[in-house]
């Protein structure tokens, strides 16, 4: 049994009409249909990792771009699994995006024109990557897909990287594929593609560039030099809360659209994409579809990763320990809401700098309103996935900044302690943890005692999670020990109240 990786695709119901090019016009009038002729579009983008977030976010923007530029259709490449290809191929790549609020919008997205599975057809992916029409490669492979070590650099001992260095024409990893595509383009005298990370990584563009160059240098120093000189890896910040697809969504779409969709997606109406301004001739006219082009993505990115994603992970682990299921339900728990708001105000915002005074307060309030959206059943268990990869980016960096500034860690230690107790809870429930370190975390969870003096060091020994600058810092280990023992002794809500963490935040 594992955490509910909420349902994926399913075949259309009996006797119903399946969404496709041929049936699209039979759908209900409320369906918003593509505003361009799909048959005239050309594939100009390759995307790796076409999960729900890609289909709700980037593919939505490219659908808008296609209304102005026919060369912006997407080839969606799944690295390993065929489930998305199998679900959407009978639909000609079409799927329904539901924008959730009090008056939901159902929009059929047509920007994905090709679906490939790299593990099945590496030659087809190679051909696409060196197609002269391709100018952009985007990716959403989550933090773990970059094969990084604890220091944010390429892990050359990662099994996929080891494989790809000896099988360069049929890689397993994103990094292997990006370098393969650039190598083929160089051999053909083509320009590199713009390589755009759309994942929640700190400094995602430079981090990706560093990993690609490290891999290329192992393959061919001349190739690495060419990439270093000619390729561009812009920083980006991406944002839209996208709950996983579930049977309720599929039933809702079938009823409202009058067409069966094997894998619709849903998101809040709020959406934002910030792309770093780089000098690259054939990139899309990002601003024409509401994408922010900025020279300072870092300020946007750090605020989002720490305020939104840091609060999300905090709610996830505290809420799951309190027996709650969704973000909206956790926000309805006064003690939790008060704690998260105070954490944002007192502990996270002081680590952020934004030019406009008052901007952080407004951003925080908008985030909290988004979290409270009753139209969204955003599962805490979904946010809890991959904690070993997410917490260093979302919380530990903030803790390191607080230590440098001499600020207390009382509240910041709580989400880390809650994650540790979550690991223990899942072990007791015999539910596997969805995380690249899922196996060691499961084994560790079964041996945890609830006593910080015996348990914390076990977590500190995990590879690539806790930097030694923290594990050897008494102010951190003391605050974490207190938070961990507090939760063990009192339960999560009483622990927050007892620690005075939940004392009403000064609403600014
Ligand atoms: C969430 C993010 O699942 C998670 O970890 O915190 O997917 C979050 O919904 C997005 O980053 C919002 O833009």
Image (cartoon, rainbow, N blue to C red):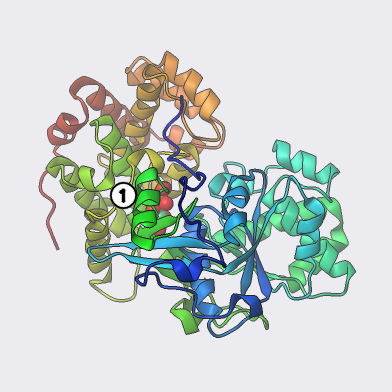
> In the image, is 174 to the left or to the right of 374?
right
Residue 441 placed where, x, y %? 49, 25
Query: Which quadrant of the view contains residue 259?
Result: bottom left
Residue ID for mark 1: 311
Residue 51, can we see it? yes
Residue 439 placed where, x, y %? 54, 25
> In the image, is 84 to the left or to the right of 430?
right
Residue 404, can we see it? no
Residue 196 placed where, x, y %? 60, 65
Q: Looking at the picture, does residue 212 appear above or below residue 32?
A: above
In the foreground, 86 or 297? 86
Q: Looking at the picture, does residue 175 appear above or below residue 300?
A: above
Decide: few, some or many residues near mark 1? Use Cα within 10 Å; few <14, some 14-19, many ≥20.
many
Position of the C terminus, as image quadrant, is bottom left
> In the image, is 428 to the left or to the right of 26?
left
Residue 84 placed where, x, y %? 58, 50
The residue under the point 63% across, 58% down is: 208
> In the image, is 289 to the left or to the right of 366?
right
């Amino acid at each position: 049994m594992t955490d509910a990786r909420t349902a994926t695709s399913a075949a259309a119901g009996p006797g119903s009409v399946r969404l496709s090019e041929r049936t699209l016009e039979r759908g209900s009038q409320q369906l918003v249909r593509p505003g361009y002729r799909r048959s005239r579009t050309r594939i100009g983008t390759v995307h790796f990792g076409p999960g729900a977030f890609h289909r709700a976010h980037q593919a939505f923007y490219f659908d808008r771009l296609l209304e102005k530029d026919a060369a912006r259709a997407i080839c969606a490449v799944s690295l390993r699994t065929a489930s998305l290809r199998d679900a959407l191929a009978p639909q000609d790549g079409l799927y329904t995006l539901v924008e959730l609020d009090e008056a939901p919008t159902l929009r059929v997205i047509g920007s994905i024109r090709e679906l490939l599975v790299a593990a099945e057809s590496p030659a087809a992916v190679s051909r696409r990557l060196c197609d002269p029409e391709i100018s952009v490669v985007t990716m959403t492979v989550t933090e773990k897909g970059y094969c990084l070590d604890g220091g944010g650099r390429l892990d050359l001992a990662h099994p996929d990287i080891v494989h790809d260095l000896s099988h360069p024409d049929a890689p397993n990893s994103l990094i292997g594929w990006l370098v393969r595509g650039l190598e083929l383009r160089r051999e053909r005298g083509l320009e590199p593609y713009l390589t755009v990370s759309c994942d929640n990584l700190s400094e995602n563009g430079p981090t990706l560039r560093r990993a690609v160059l490290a891999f290329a240098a192992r393959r061919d120093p001349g190739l690495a030099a060419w990439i270093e000189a000619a390729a561009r890896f812009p920083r980006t910040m991406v944002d839209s809360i996208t709950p996983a697809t579930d049977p309720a969504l599929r039933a809702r779409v079938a009823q409202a659209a009058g067409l069966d969709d094997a894998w619709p997606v849903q998101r809040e109406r709020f959406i934002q994409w910030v792309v770093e301004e780089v000098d690259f001739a054939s990139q899309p006219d990002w601003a024409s579809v509401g994408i922010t082009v900025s020279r300072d993505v870092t300020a946007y990115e750090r605020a989002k990763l720490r305020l939104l994603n840091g609060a999300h992970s905090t709610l996830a682990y505290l809420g799951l320990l309190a027996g709650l299921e969704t973000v909206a339900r956790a926000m309805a728990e006064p003690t939790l809401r008060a704690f998260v708001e105070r954490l944002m105000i007192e502990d996270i915002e002081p680590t952020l700098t934004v030019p406009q005074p008052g901007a952080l307060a407004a951003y925080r309030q908008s985030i909290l309103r988004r979290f409270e959206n009753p139209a969204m059943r955003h599962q805490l268990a979904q946010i809890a996935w991959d904690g070993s990869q997410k917490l260093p980016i979302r919380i530990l960096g903030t803790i390191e900044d607080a230590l440098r500034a001499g600020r207390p860690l009382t509240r910041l230690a709580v989400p880390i302690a809650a994650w540790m107790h979550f690991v223990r809870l899942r072990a007791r429930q015999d539910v596997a943890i969805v995380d690249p370190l899922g196996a060691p975390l499961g084994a560790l969870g079964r041996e945890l005692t609830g006593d910080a003096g015996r348990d914390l060091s076990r977590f500190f020994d995990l590879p690539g999670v806790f930097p030694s600058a923290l594990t050897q810092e008494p102010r951190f280990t003391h605050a974490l020990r207190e938070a961990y023992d507090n939760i063990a002794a009192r339960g999560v809500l009483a622990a927050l109240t007892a620690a005075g963490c939940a004392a009403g935040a000064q609403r600014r």
